[in-house]
Image (tube, helix red, strand yellow):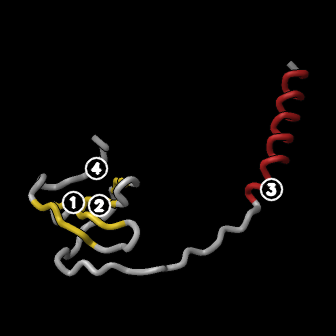
Amino acid sequence: MQFRLHTLVVLLFTFTLFQRPLLAQDALPLTLIGTTPLPEISGGDFDHFAVDLKDNRLYVVAEVYGSIEVFDLRTGKHLQSARGVVKSPRKIVFLED
């Protein structure tokens, strides 16, 4: 029993020792590179996204507005609103096919 406890302590110490440099790295601050005005959409959450890397599109669920918003990933430009797809979309999944 005592041998197992000693082994566990050594393993935990070793794991902590080697993980320390990863935790000590400084994170760079985020920098705003642009904004995209959406005057037609007033309020609501934008917390569900899907990405189409092949066609460089970002799909965003506007839950309160009841739409799916489409953006160009390269330019950040708002391309389209798909309104009335569902009453209150909550999640989105992009399928290539």
Give the secondary structure at mark 4.
loop
Between marks 3 and 1, how big is the CA–CA gap? 42 Å
Quadrant in the picture for residue 14: top right
Residue 12: x and y in percent read 81, 38
Frontmost of labels 3 and 4 is: 4
The residue indicated by pointer 2 is: 60
Task: Single out the residue that lies furthest toward the front.
Answer: 54
Amino acid at pointer 3: Pro
Quadrant in the picture for residue 42: bottom left
Seen in the image, is 16 located left or right of residue 68? right
Eyeballing the image, is 57 above or below 78? above
The residue indicated by pointer 1 is: 68
The residue indicated by pointer 4 is: 92
Eyeballing the image, is 22 above or below 29? above
Residue placed most toward the observer, 61 or 13: 61
The residue indicated by pointer 3 is: 21
Amino acid at pointer 4: Ile
Q: Do the residues labelled 4 and 2 touch (CB within 8 Å)?
A: yes
Q: Which of the two discs, 4 and 2, labels the residue nearer the N terminus?
A: 2
Seen in the image, is 88 located left or right of residue 46? left
Eyeballing the image, is 10 above or below 22? above
Task: Single out the residue that lies furthest toward the top.
Answer: 1
Q: For the residue carrying disc 2, how many other residues have a C-alpha within 10 Å: few (<14), some (14-19), or many (20+)?
A: many
Q: Which of the two discs, 3 and 1, labels the residue nearer the N terminus?
A: 3
Q: For the residue carrying disc 4, how many other residues have a C-alpha within 10 Å: few (<14), some (14-19), or many (20+)?
A: some
Q: Which of the two discs, 2 and 3, labels the residue nearer the N terminus?
A: 3
Q: Do the residues labelled 4 and 1 touch (CB within 8 Å)?
A: yes
